[in-house]
Image (spheres, rainbow, N blue to C red):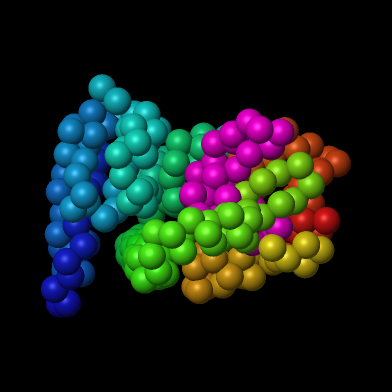
């Protein structure tokens, strides 16, 4: 068994589910913390938790509500475990800030694959952020930074139609108004807008964003649906994200 440093918090009101998850994860070498509901999970939020696995339907505070609160304090990935498999439930889940969604009963193998993938993605993002900060630190004197600041800012803004994507802060504005997106939603927009007219299949999206094989199509479809809703983009006649039926998605 590999001794891993990652700490994972699992929140589920069913002790049997928590026992199964704890056994699976500790056998893989992960450190595990537990909570019986969303409120208890929120009380245990700290920088040492690298992944949150939350049941949706819990007493006191639901997984959806807990995820929204966790997002205020942590960028660690969130995965929902739930008995609800409907598209509407997935859409709500991803709107709450979730990174993945697994339906009960789940395969132990699939659960572990998704856990590894989420931790791997989060690790890459941390490394990229640290590398960018180090480059900025070594860029030169404060005066040089001020002189180049305007060009750097311009270079880190991606314009598409009436949208402005700030690649540094991962924020989006339209006509001066901020549009609140999750991390994955922003990544999808950046991918599409950086390659206009290129059709991205499900496999292309997973490889481009996370360098891994695609796992199901429900998650990406839910993210696209959320994006269109937040951008007031019609699915029938989209302005920003278009569907190439049977092929994938693209920005025109």
Tell whether 78 sits left or right of 200. left
Q: Is residue 167 magenta?
A: yes
The residue most toward the front is 143
The image position of residue 26, as x and y in percent, is 15, 63
Q: The C terminus appears in which quarter of the rendering?
A: bottom right
> Viewer-proximal residue, 4 or 231?
231
Q: Is residue 26 visible?
A: yes
Figure check: 220 above or below 127: above
The image position of residue 221, as x and y in percent, is 63, 50
Residue at image point 81% right, 63% down? 197
Residue at image point 43% right, 59% down? 143
Figure check: 62 above or below 134: above
Tell whether 139 sits left or right of 246. left
Residue at image point 35% right, 48% down? 75
> Viewer-proximal residue, 185 or 220?
185
Give the magenta range.
166-193
Q: Is residue 89 visible?
A: no
Residue at image point 49% right, 73% down? 212
Tell whether 250 sits left or right of 26. right
């Amino acid at each position: 068994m590999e001794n891993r440093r990652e700490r994972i918090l699992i929140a589920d009101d069913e002790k049997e589910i928590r026992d199964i998850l704890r056994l699976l994860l500790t056998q893989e070498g992960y450190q595990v913390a537990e909570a019986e509901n969303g409120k208890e999970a929120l009380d245990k939020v700290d920088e040492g938790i690298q992944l949150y696995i939350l049941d949706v339907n819990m007493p006191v505070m639901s997984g959806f509500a807990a995820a929204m609160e966790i997002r205020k304090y942590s960028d660690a990935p969130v995965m929902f475990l739930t008995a609800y498999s409907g598209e509407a439930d997935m859409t709500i889940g991803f709107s709450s800030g979730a990174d993945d969604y697994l339906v009960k009963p789940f395969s132990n193998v699939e659960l572990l694959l998704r856990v590894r993938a989420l931790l791997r993605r989060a690790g890459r993002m941390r490394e990229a952020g640290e590398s960018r900060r180090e480059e900025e630190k070594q860029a030169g004197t404060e005066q040089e930074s001020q002189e180049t600041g305007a060009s750097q800012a311009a270079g880190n803004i991606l314009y598409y139609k009436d949208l402005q994507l700030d690649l540094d802060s991962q924020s989006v504005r339209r006509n001066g108004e901020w549009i609140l997106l999750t991390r994955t939603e922003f990544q999808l927009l950046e991918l599409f807008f950086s390659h206009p007219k290129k059709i991205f299949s499900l496999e292309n999206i997973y490889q481009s964003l996370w360098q891994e094989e695609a796992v199901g199509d429900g998650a990406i479809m839910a993210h696209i649906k959320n994006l269109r809703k937040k951008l007031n983009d019609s699915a029938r006649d989209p302005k920003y994200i278009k569907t190439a039926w049977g092929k994938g998605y693209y920005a025109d």
